[in-house]
């Protein structure tokens, strides 16, 4: 880390957020996110993206992924699409973001219209609904497994673990609106991280 | 075709504001989308809207692909593409700008602290997302149990491919339905 960086200065590199090595090409980004789009059932793009992009391809780190999840949920818009914009940008700048989002959305756009056409022609049997329920259930299981894996663990991580569980408590059990919960917990959590970083 | 063009323009004027107001994810958009497309513009009936919502949930991808279906009902292919772009482009530009701005401070002490502080909140939000989807699922207790079973399998065997579980879940529920169990 440079002296300037340690003092809390602004990074001198204008494009520091873009990967230095441009080994991951735009077609590869498009292809990865296209596959992600057509296989992300159950509306939980983040968990599926973590599995495909972070765990299997190692294109971004856990910490980068979580940072993008958080910002993606604070900013308006679909959390999954916002996450895709940021990961694409990390991989290849503006072009990477476009390739990732177009890749993510183009497949589902065609599929959803095809489903609508099929639905108006032939209708759906209860068995189709049951199959969709089963796929959705497995996708939710993936989401839970991903969230639990990313929750901090170990004796030294008690405070972050408590913050993560408090988030679930406020949003899912007490059912408070997400934005105030995040804006309320974030200063506490960041402050504790700052103190911990100074002691370390 | 000025009429078609007017419809596309109306789609833009409906979905661009929704894009920028949809804080907290797509689910909060649903009521607004229904009001605009059923009551205000008459692009679809209330009954059809419920069907379109069910179809959008069945398709892969972000849950808000409902916008494409509304666009389709209003103006065919051009409408579907217009509505999709109108819903996703403004918020994407916003998050792109925010991420670039945020990246400028990379390397500073507080940048690292903010990222470390937000990480557990992000993990909690992923869990909450799963619970939110379970809550609106029409499948009942069987879906809850299958979700927990899939979670346990994935935690126990992390190398298990999720698509295998997706297929098993779909097949299991489909067979149970065919056998009259559900």
Image (tube, coloured by chain):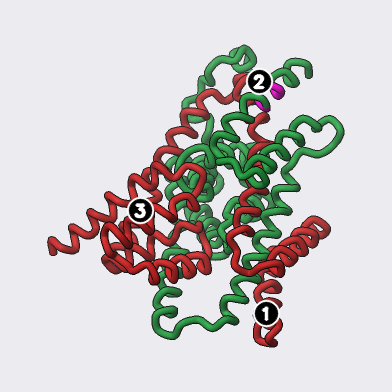
Task: Please tell me how crowded label 2 is: few (under 14), some (14-19), or many (20+) other residues with Cα within 10 Å.
Answer: few
Question: To which chain does the residue with label 1 belong?
Answer: B
x%, y% of residue A121?
A: 40, 84
Q: Helix, strand or loop at disc 2?
A: loop
Vertically, is A8 above or below A112?
Answer: above
Mark 3, residue position: B85
Q: Is residue B108 left or right of residue B92?
A: right
| Number of numbered tags placed on the structure image | 3
Q: Where is residue A109 shown, x and y percent of the image?
A: 42, 64
Q: Main secondary structure of the magenta part?
A: helix
Kindly report the distance in space between the C-alpha atoms of the residues bearing marks 1 and 3: 39 Å
Mark 1 vs 3: CB contact within 8 A: no
Q: Which residue is mark 1?
A: B182
Q: Vertically, is A184 above or below A101?
A: above
Q: Is residue B161 visible?
A: no
- Residue A1 is marked as 2
**For residue A95, what is the image quadrant?**
top left
**Sooner in the amino-acid sequence: mark 1 or mark 3:** 3
Residue B68, quarter of the rendered image: bottom left
For label 1, the crowd category at 10 Å Cα-Cα, with few meaning under 14, some 14 to 19 and many 20 or more, is some
Residue pictured at 69% horizontal, 87% vertical? B179
Question: Which secondary structure, mark 1?
Answer: loop
Please tell me the numbered disc located at residue B158: none
Image chain in red: B
Colour of chain A as rendered: green
Of the pair A88 and A138, the residue shown nearer to us: A138
Quadrant of the image for the C terminus of chain B?
bottom right
State which region is magenta.
Answer: A189-193
Q: Is residue B97 above or below residue B91?
A: above
Residue A167 visible (yes or no): yes
Q: In the displayed structure, does residue A143 sit left or right of residue A20? A: right
């Amino acid at each position: 880390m440079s002296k300037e960086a340690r003092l809390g200065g602004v990074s001198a590199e204008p494009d520091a957020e873009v990967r230095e090595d441009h080994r991951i090409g735009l077609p590869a980004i498009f292809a990865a996110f296209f596959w992600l789009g057509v296989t992300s059932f159950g509306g939980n793009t983040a968990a599926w993206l973590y599995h495909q992009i972070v765990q299997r391809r190692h294109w971004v780190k856990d910490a980068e992924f979580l940072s993008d999840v958080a910002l993606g949920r604070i900013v308006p818009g679909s959390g999954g699409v916002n996450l895709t914009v940021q990961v694409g940008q990390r991989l290849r700048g503006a072009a990477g973001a476009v390739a990732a989002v177009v890749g993510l959305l183009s497949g589902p756009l065609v599929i959803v219209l095809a489903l609508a056409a099929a639905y108006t022609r032939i209708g759906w049997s209860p068995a189709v609904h049951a199959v969709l329920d089963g796929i959705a259930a497995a996708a939710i299981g993936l989401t839970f497994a991903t969230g639990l894996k990313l929750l901090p663990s170990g004796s030294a991580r008690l405070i972050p673990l408590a913050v993560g569980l408090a988030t679930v408590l406020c949003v899912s059990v007490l059912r408070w609106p997400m934005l105030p919960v995040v804006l309320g917990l974030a200063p506490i959590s960041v402050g504790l991280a700052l103190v911990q970083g100074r002691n370390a | 075709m000025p009429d078609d063009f007017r419809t596309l323009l109306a789609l833009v004027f409906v979905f661009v504001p929704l894009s920028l107001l949809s804080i907290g994810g797509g689910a909060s958009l649903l009521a607004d989308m229904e009001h605009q497309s059923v009551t205000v513009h008459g692009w679809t009936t209330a009954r059809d809207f419920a069907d379109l919502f069910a179809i959008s949930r069945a398709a892969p991808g972000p849950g808000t692909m409902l916008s494409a279906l509304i666009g389709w009902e209003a103006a065919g292919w051009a409408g579907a593409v217009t509505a999709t772009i109108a819903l996703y482009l403004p918020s994407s530009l916003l998050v792109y700008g925010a991420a670039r701005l945020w990246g400028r401070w990379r390397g500073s002490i507080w940048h690292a602290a903010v990222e470390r502080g937000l990480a557990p909140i992000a993990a909690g939000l992923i869990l909450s997302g799963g619970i939110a989807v379970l809550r609106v699922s029409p499948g009942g207790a069987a879906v809850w149990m299958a979700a927990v079973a899939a979670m346990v399998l994935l935690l126990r065997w992390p190398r298990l491919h999720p698509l295998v579980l997706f297929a098993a879940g779909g097949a299991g529920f489909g067979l149970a339905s065919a056998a009259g169990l559900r």
